[in-house]
Amino acid sequence: MAMMAVACVDQKPPLAPTAVAGPTPPVATPPFPTTVPGVLAVALPIDRGDAANAIFGIAPFGYHSADHAAGGHTGWDIEYRIGGIVRAAAAGTVESVDPDPLNAGRFIVQIEHIIGEHHYRTTYTNLVSVNADIAPPEVVRAGQPIGQAGTQSTPATRGTPGTAYAMTHFQLDDFEYYREIPNPNAVSPEPFLTADAKSFFDGLWSNAAYLHELVEPFPTNPRDLRFPTSRIWTRAGGDGPAGIRFIRDNATSPALQYHLLAESGTVIESGDVALNSTARPYPFIDLISTTAVHIGIYDVVSNELRLSLTTPGSQRPLDLSTASVYRTTK
């Protein structure tokens, strides 16, 4: 998954004194979408042994891509090992089992959850099979197997075969909440996670890597984001430039531009970004201006970016042991 756009500008970033990054500031969990009594507690729809991270690990709530341009991503895409089992995130009643309109030969299961007078629904897509006991109006328990996650594959490029992986889209609808966008009841599962599920999620999230995280880096991103948009990362440690701004012009294209910033906020270099977010153990990043190409690797976990760039002509770094640390605000 690589991308490039059009380049411009001027000079190399100056070196800055090495600083030691302090502890990463915690990112607050989003509040519940309503104050209506009756809060659903959810687990992740996956066992620890079924988790995988060959392609993305987890793609978060709210991010914008070509197929989520209008209203942002309505749930979490969760990557499974091939053959992994999708499980009910909470106890409830099977509402429907239908063909998946986005994935031929696959199924969507929806489960209704009633807490007092509060009505929720969880949705599980791209199931290659559904267990016989998952049918309306059967009652299911939390953690009960629903079916098997369907396999997808990345496109083949430059003569190399695509990579196979399994995934499901996990969505939570809160029917006390509504906004004037597609899927108006969809809310982030993040504030509803049980303590055990939150611990499990944090481990998965720390290794997730997806194409849009330099601008939309959080487990819960705003669905109503307006484009063009940008995000500034400010250096907290290391020898890199004082700041980096990543700019994305529209929701239908993942193309990014960058500005390297001096301490004053002045732009000292601009150009285009090329990413390979599926490279492992760390995604690849190239910053391409008219005067230089910086190649490197990076890792984003919510509000922290670790970035290791080489000087022109050097090889791509192998690890992040000498990375600069950058932070952003939510």
Image (cartoon, rainbow, N blue to C red):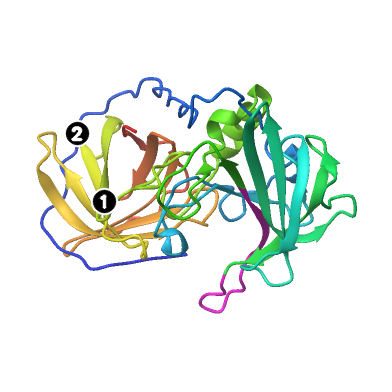
**In the shown orientation, is residue 324 left or right of residue 39?**
left
Q: Which residue is at 69% across, 72% downward?
A: 104
Element type at mark 2: loop
Q: Is residue 159 magenta?
A: yes
Residue farthest bottom in this picture: 159
Q: Tell me which segment is drawn in magenta.
A: 155-170
Residue 58 lies, in percent from the top left, at 57, 46
Q: Nearer the viewer, mark 1 or mark 2?
A: 1
Q: Earlier in the sequence, mark 1 or mark 2?
A: 2
Q: Amino acid at mark 2?
A: Ala
**In the shown orientation, is residue 146 left or right of residue 186?**
right
Q: Is residue 62 visible?
A: yes
297 or 267, which is in the foreground? 267
Q: Which residue matches tag 1? A: 229
The answer to whether the residue labelled 1 contacts the one labelled 2, judged by CB atoms less than 8 Å apart, is no
Instruction: State the mark number for residue 16.
Output: 2
232 or 36, which is in the foreground? 36
Residue 225, compared with residue 288, is above or below; it is above
**In the shown orientation, is residue 296 left or right of residue 77?**
left
Residue 179 lies, in percent from the top left, at 42, 45
Instruction: State the mark number for residue 242.
Output: none
Q: Amino acid at mark 1?
A: Thr
Residue 227 lies, in percent from the top left, at 27, 55
Residue 11 lies, in percent from the top left, at 11, 53
Marks 1 and 2, how far apart at CA: 27 Å
59 or 69, which is in the foreground? 69
Q: Which residue is at 12% across, 48% downward?
A: 268
Q: Residues within 10 Å of mark 2 (few under 14, many from 20)?
A: some
Residue farthest right in this picture: 132
Element type at mark 1: strand
User: If the image is split into quadrants, where does the C terminus sit?
Assistant: top left
